[in-house]
């Protein structure tokens, strides 16, 4: 629930331009270009608006479902590769850090998701087997499907 006055389009434009220049919330506050905003308001607006410099060619418009789930071994290998890459960098910008944060969070969350996925696959397989068994029994007794 917002407590302060709403942000104007002009304020958001100024904030976006400064964020795209790589300025931190503190640097934006210290610039004095948003005199009616506190440091905390600027910091929160940056987080709420998810204002980061992005390369528009990197935006994914559609995500196709994978034909097969990755094994935990594959996820660990990808995670290890990403971790090694970030450790080898001499300088890291905010966008690169955010990309790696997303990769690491996804790797952390993948294990439980994979476990649930595998359980559902097993349940679906058993339901199919039961449906086939019922169909066989019905065929043996001469019962027609409803």
Image (tube, rainbow, N blue to C red):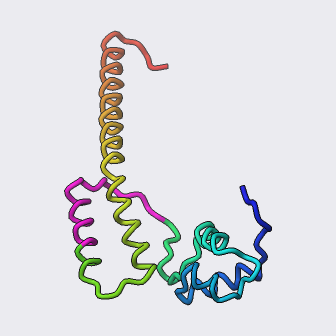
Q: Is residue 103 left or right of residue 94?
A: left
Residue occupying the point 62% across, 66% down: 48
Q: Is residue 24 above or below residue 74?
A: below
> Quarter-wise, where is residue 36 in the image?
bottom right
Residue occupying the point 33% across, 53% down: 110
Q: Is residue 65 above or below residue 10?
A: above
> Is 133 included in the stretch rendered in magenta?
no
Q: Closest to the observer: 23 or 9?
A: 23
**x, y percent for residue 73:** 19, 56
Q: Is residue 81 left or right of residue 17?
A: left
Q: Which residues are magenta?
A: 63-83
Q: Is residue 38 left or right of residue 78?
A: right
Residue occupying the point 30% across, 54% down: 68
The residue at the far top in this view is 141
Residue occupying the point 58% across, 68% down: 47
Q: Closest to the observer: 10 or 111?
A: 10
> Is 78 included in the stretch rendered in magenta?
yes
Q: Is residue 15 above or below residue 111?
A: below
């Amino acid at each position: 629930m917002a407590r302060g006055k709403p942000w104007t389009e002009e304020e958001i434009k100024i904030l976006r331009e400064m964020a795209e220049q790589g300025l931190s919330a503190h640097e934006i506050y210290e610039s004095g270009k948003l005199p009616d905003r506190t440091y905390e308001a600027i910091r929160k607006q940056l987080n709420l608006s998810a204002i980061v410099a992005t390369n528009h060619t990197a935006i994914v418009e559609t995500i196709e479902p994978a034909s097969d789930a990755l094994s935990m071994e594959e996820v660990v290998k990808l995670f290890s590769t990403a971790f090694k890459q970030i450790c080898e960098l001499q300088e890291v910008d905010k966008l690169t850090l955010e990309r790696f944060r997303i990769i690491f969070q996804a790797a952390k969350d993948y294990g439980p998701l994979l476990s649930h996925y595998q359980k559902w696959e097993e349940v679906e397989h058993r339901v199919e087997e039961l449906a086939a068994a019922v169909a066989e029994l019905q065929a043996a007794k001469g019962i027609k499907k409803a």
